[in-house]
Amino acid sequence: MPPPVVWQQRWHPLREEWVLFTSHRGGRPWIGDTHKPAVAAVPGYDPTCALCPGNRRLHGENPRYPGTYCFTNDLPCFSAEAPAPVGGDDFYRTRPATGTAEVVCYSPDHAKTFVDLTDEECRAVVDLWAERTVVLGARADVDHVLIFENKGSLVGTSNPHPHCQIYAGNLIYGFTAREVESGRKFFQGTGRCLGQEILAREAAGPRVITQNDAWLACVPWFARYAYEVFILPKRPAASLADLTSAERASLGLMVREVATRYDNLWRLPMPYVMAVHQAPCDGPDYAFYPFHLEFHPPLRKPDTMKYLAGPEIGGGSMTNESDPDEKAAELRAVPSVHYKRS
Ligand SMILES: [Zn+2]
């Protein structure tokens, strides 16, 4: 048995920050709130859902779409009509929030999640992500396309309809900005892609969960959350726009398998925040950028949240109360077929 990961800090090579590991504290007595993800039956169509086919939204009405469906967010956080800022100066700087925001429905079926999609439906979602990355990235008022999914009420999603969001504006999101710098430094120092270095180390280690021809899923050595999962490409890529049609198809299957293994862990719909980390589109060549997907589930146990508190919110550094090798083994041990179908 390897020694437990205690009183140890690990360097996060993408964010360039230390993560504190205290796996001896993971089993400490808990007398606070407990949370179980909702497992209430969800109907295939909800007349009050803003995302279901044929329903009215705040602005407009959804067509009776048969597959994926993408539309401009009714309350976008970026806009082509952003007014010139009022106030501000050289110190308290300001700028308009230009761009747009979109919503992508994975399916017309209100009751489905990514785990329920067919191979073709998985592929259609990733194809749409790639198409919107190219289309939105070509806009002069868009510097970065952030694609993310908030799944479950524990991460603040009020609507279970399977969907993700795309924020495309003149803001390069903070983690991507850091990964541009870490990726650039690594490339300048070694001539290699930082993402491929992480891939090589994880592929040889005990934290691989699953892999296919083009992708590897692992709990990275420097994981910040107990069940954090990265999906890494097996060849250098900077964004969804770099992927071949076959790579997009196998990425869809990999996302579905990760989500399925999460659900199978406790036979519950696992909440998570998923984010596609891709290079900015503000002009420069970012071929060195370490494209990947990240999943951050907030649960440490079926009924225990990882609360961000003093060390994280107050201090700005993450504490992980578990051993990534052990968490990867748990996710590897569960079936790749969803419990609802086994
Ligand atoms: Zn719906």
Image (spheres, rainbow, N blue to C red):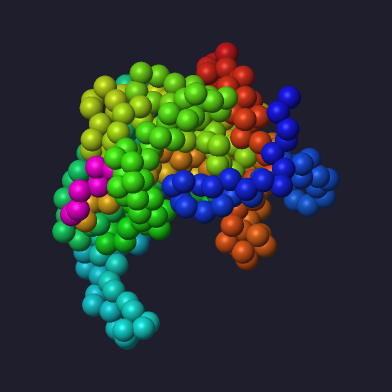
Q: Position of residue 24 (x, y in %)?
A: 77, 41
With 282 as the anchor, is 11 left or right in this view? right
Does residue 71 appear anywhere in the picture? no
Residue lying at 49% horizontally and 29% vertically, measured from the top left: 202
Residue 284 in the magenta stretch? The answer is yes
Residue nearest the observer in this picture, 60 or 339 = 339
Q: Is residue 113 above or below residue 79?
A: above
Residue interval drawn in magenta: 283-288
Residue nearest the observer in this picture, 128 or 198 = 198
Which residue is outermost to the front? Answer: 189
Residue lying at 43% horizontally and 29% vertically, measured from the top left: 200
Q: Position of residue 107 (x, y in %)?
A: 37, 32
With 317 as the anchor, is 83 left or right in this view? left
Image mark count: 0
Which residue is outermost to the top? Answer: 342
With 226 as the anchor, is 257 left or right in this view? left
Quadrant of the rendering where the C terminus is positioned:
top right
Asked where in the image residue 301 lies, by quadrant, the reply is top right
Asked where in the image residue 187 lies, by quadrant, the reply is top left
Helix, strand or loop: magenta stretch: loop
Does residue 204 appear anywhere in the picture? yes
With 276 as the anchor, is 26 left or right in this view? right
Q: Is residue 81 above or below residue 255?
A: below
Q: Position of residue 112 (x, y in %)?
A: 46, 30
Residue 338 in the magenta stretch? The answer is no
Q: Position of residue 209 (x, y in %)?
A: 53, 24
Residue nearest the observer in this picture, 200 or 39 = 200
Residue lying at 47% horizontally and 25% vertically, measured from the top left: 203
Quadrant of the rendering where the N terminus is positioned:
top right
